[in-house]
Amino acid sequence: MPAIAKQKSRLHFTFTTSDQATAHGGQALVDALARRFDLWRKLDALPNLDPRIRKQSGFAPSATIAQLLFTLTSGGTSLADAERLGQDKVLLEILGLAKGADQTTLGEYLRAQTPDSVRDLLNLNAQFVDWAWSLTPKPRILHAGWTEYFFDDTEIEVYGDKIEGARFNYEGKRALSWQVLWKGPFVLDHQLDGATDVSEHLPSLLAEHQHRWQGERSYLYVDSGSSGARYVNAIDQAAFTRWSVSYNKWTEKLEKLAAALPESAWSAAATEPGATVEQYAWVRHQPGDCARTHDFAVVRRKDPDELLCRYGFVMCEAGEVKDPQAIFERHQLKGAKEQGFSHLLSDLDLHHPPCLELVANQAFYAIAVLAYNVLTALRLLELPDDAQGWRIRTLIRYLLTVPVTISRHARYHRARICVPAGWLRWWRLYFQRWVPKRGIGRPVFEAVDAGPVDGAVAPRARGRPAG
């Protein structure tokens, strides 16, 4: 076989306009999933989301939010990207949008939102999580039969001194606090503002969603920022089946209690010569203003060249677990939960808020979280097992960014989707099941034309869309 070297292409190049093709054909999958949840109708049914005085003109909430959501799920990161998406006529036709808003109109819409409308968006997001959770195969979202929750805070750094709500963090940089409550791989709820305490919204988030984990085996992971008595009491009252909190603050009393334990209270030490000695035990303690005495799993470690032991603590609701080492092993899974922030922040590029007003940024991040959950649901509900490890960026790059060309015929338009190799059957099955299509001459967009071998998709009919 001859050696392969880089050669000049022998192809001849021709160019066409954006009126005939788009690179974002996979957004039809996102639209179909949103329609299954009836998202667009539910958005228009929330009066707080519509700041228009004249409802007969302008962009309805479903149109504006859809433009932002499709921008985020196609790799866009800003209002300028949303404006460019609104100029993609082929994509708009695929999605059923007659026109796209410019970035000024989008910014005005976000600034017109209120705390009530942001709360409506967050409630709708929680409803979507409930819906997607009920349909997802349980082995994909449960850990050994347990529903896992996770709370943490991350910093959204901002530039300039006019970002409303921003304050200086511990590194001396201006930032907003983003406190997030996760349910499995989904973002259940969140709060973006200028909170100075990293767990300020934990009690209210737990109180609001407590009904969601009643009657199920639930486990909450929390880091040391929530180890204060106020937050421990809130976690305790939230009635999780089990929970664990990293505890590396106010450990002086715990270290004294651990040091006073008899040797029989500790687990057996490793016997390998030169290995670090690691032993586990239980202590009970009532910190500060906590409402009751709590269990602490404690580990003591000592390297061969060390004189004194090092202690680590995890505050927990142990339940039926009798082995303190099992508490540490379970709590270490919190590290995997923290990676969700990387998927959310990096893959959707949410490191920088787009607006100066706090409520506008809160509305934008509420839409971004909804976009993240929609893509997560698409992966969990529809993709095969070997694709369950895909990140959001992978999903966008290899499944949603596919070219589509439009051909116009006398009685209909046809969209020809260039499907990735090996995925043709999956696309056909998805469209057969979930994408509405129409027959020629029918006024309502009803179903999907999985159609001929080329995988073409029937266009939206004229008239009012169904649903």
Image (cartoon, rainbow, N blue to C red):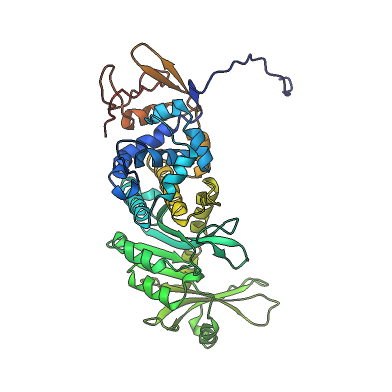
Quarter of the figure that contains the C terminus: top left
Q: Position of residue 261 (x, y in %)?
A: 51, 86
Above or below residue 320? Residue 457 is: above
Quarter of the figure that contains the N terminus: top right
| Residue 387 visible in the picture | no
| Residue most extreme to the top | 410
Q: Position of residue 315 (x, y in %)?
A: 45, 74
Q: Is residue 138 left or right of residue 221?
A: left
Q: Is residue 353 left or right of residue 212?
A: right
Q: Position of residue 46 (x, y in %)?
A: 29, 47
Q: How many marks?
A: 0
Q: Is residue 464 left or right of residue 152?
A: left
Above or below residue 112? Residue 416 is: above
Return the residue nearer the eye: 243 or 280.
Answer: 243
Q: Position of residue 177 (x, y in %)?
A: 50, 62
Return the residue nearer the eye: 148 or 15.
Answer: 15
Above or below residue 170? Residue 251 is: below
Please name the residue shown 45% across and 25% down the image.
Answer: 90
| Residue 266 visible in the picture | yes
Please name the residue shown 40% across and 40% down the image.
Answer: 64
Please name the residue shown 48% across and 57% down the image.
Answer: 337
Return the residue nearer the eye: 293 or 170.
Answer: 170
Please name the residue shown 53% across and 81% down the image.
Answer: 251
